[in-house]
Image (tube, grey):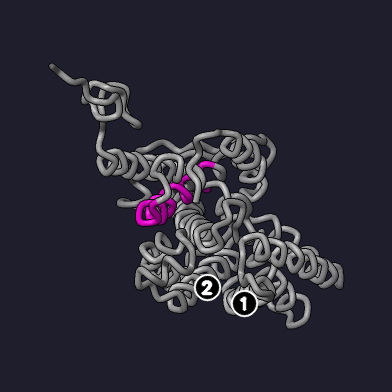
């Protein structure tokens, strides 16, 4: 008598990732990783070439390796397009990983730096530095943004931890939304204090990666690099934390060290990114959802893939913002909101989207 293998174990049965057969999960994730790298490279190239004025690939090559300062297009590539692209790569990676860490840490798929008040704290601190202290250089904003992000993150977590059930995702979200409203109001009050502050902050507050000098990365780059490294090191602990505090503790996960590491990473990433580019929305909220759709809930894959996909999305939004309006450009913060909102709604409506 012969037996037939169950459909889920037969080699000719459709696999979860392939229409012709079962593909090992790690092989699928590796292919997704290669695809993410390819997309990121393509977006970086487009970011240098495409804009209100298109530049040929040969001109870009000459600008990078045979620079002639007498050619306007090469000057545009070296002085405008390349710094914009590099800042987009750095800021996008910071925002994406920050959102993925907060979602895993709070076990809340709707959490991001904006929802939990991190951006509001950084924005308030930067506005205070401009309105009260008279600072105007974005490089000077970094330390104020870090202090504001850290202070409000700690305050949100403290308020969300009050009570017998400690820090639940719902309580953290409510505390973040409430404090975001308070500090957004304070930021608006400071912004309206003077026309000079309003003129400076109305552009910074929208979010943009254009018009920044690469010199700012001498300060922001090491801070974001440290935040990325610390965040990646928490991946295994965050996997255990998804099972609940008691189970994670039984598995030997140092909860205190993990929480401190996540808070420190989020502060470095969000605070520095906001100081450099302003509060850009939806990158940290949407991109981790897209990544989980392809990889599942394993943070060891979600976090590094988010670092690749988020800057690709940010650069794509920036390119769209440059070409969509013939008389100017849309700031990237507006484009990410316009593109991110419907995509996020579509992802949330999918029944098989990966959970936390």
Which of 276/300 is in front?
A: 300
Provide the residue designation for mark 1: 154
- Tell whether 206 sits left or right of 353: right
Residue 180 seen in the figure: yes
Provide the residue designation for mark 2: 263
Which of 302/83 is in front?
A: 302
Packing grade of label 2 (10 A; few <14, some 14-19, many >=20) is: many
Whether residue 298 is situated above or below residue 325 in the rendered picture: below
Let me know if residue 304 is in the magenta part.
Answer: yes
User: Residue at (38%, 52%) from the top-left corner?
Assistant: 298
- Give the residue furthest to the left: 1
Give the image location of residue 44, x and y in percent: 42, 46
Whether residue 219 is situated above or below residue 119 in the rendered picture: below
User: Residue at (41%, 45%) from the top-left corner?
Assistant: 296
- Residues under numbered marks 2 and 1 in contact, where contact means CB atoms less than 8 Å apart: yes
Element carrying mark 2: helix
- Give the residue furthest to the top: 1
Give the image location of residue 9, x and y in percent: 25, 30
> Which residues, given as a range, are shown in magenta?
298-316
Q: Quadrant of residue 321?
A: top right
């Amino acid at each position: 008598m012969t037996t037939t293998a169950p459909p889920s174990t037969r080699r000719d049965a459709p696999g979860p990732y392939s229409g012709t057969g079962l593909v090992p999960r790690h092989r699928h994730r590796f292919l997704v990783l290669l695809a993410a790298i390819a997309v990121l490279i393509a977006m970086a190239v487009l970011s240098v070439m495409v804009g209100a004025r298109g530049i040929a690939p040969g001109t870009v090559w000459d600008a990078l390796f045979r620079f002639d300062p007498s050619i306007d297009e090469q000057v545009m590539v070296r002085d405008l397009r390349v710094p914009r692209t590099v800042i987009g790569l750095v800021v996008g990676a910071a925002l994406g990983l920050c959102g993925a860490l907060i979602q895993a840490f709070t076990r809340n798929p709707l959490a991001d730096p904006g929802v939990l008040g991190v951006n509001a704290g950084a924005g308030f601190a930067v506005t205070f530095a401009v309105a009260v202290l008279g600072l105007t250089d974005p490089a000077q904003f970094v330390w104020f943004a870090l202090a504001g992000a850290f202070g409000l993150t700690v305050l949100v977590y403290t308020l969300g931890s009050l009570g017998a059930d400690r820090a639940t995702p719902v309580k953290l979200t409510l505390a973040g939304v409430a404090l975001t409203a308070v500090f957004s109001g304070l930021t608006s009050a400071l912004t309206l204090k003077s026309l000079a502050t309003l003129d400076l902050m109305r552009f910074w507050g929208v979010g943009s990666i254009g018009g920044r000098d690469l010199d700012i990365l001498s300060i922001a780059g090491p801070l974001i690099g440290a935040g990325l490294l610390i965040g990646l090191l928490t991946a295994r602990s965050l996997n255990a934390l998804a099972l609940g505090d008691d189970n994670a503790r039984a598995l030997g996960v140092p909860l205190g060290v993990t929480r401190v590491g996540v808070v420190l990473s989020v502060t470095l990433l969000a605070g520095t990114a906001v100081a450099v580019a302003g509060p850009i929305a939806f990158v940290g909220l949407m991109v981790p959802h897209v990544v989980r759709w392809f990889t599942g809930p394993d943070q060891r894959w979600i976090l590094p893939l988010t670092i690749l996909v988020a800057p690709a999305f940010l650069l794509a939004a920036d390119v769209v913002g440059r070409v969509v309006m013939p008389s100017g450009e849309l700031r990237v913060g507006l484009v990410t909101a316009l593109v991110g909102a419907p995509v996020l709604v579509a992802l949330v409506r999918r029944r098989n989207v990966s959970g936390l």
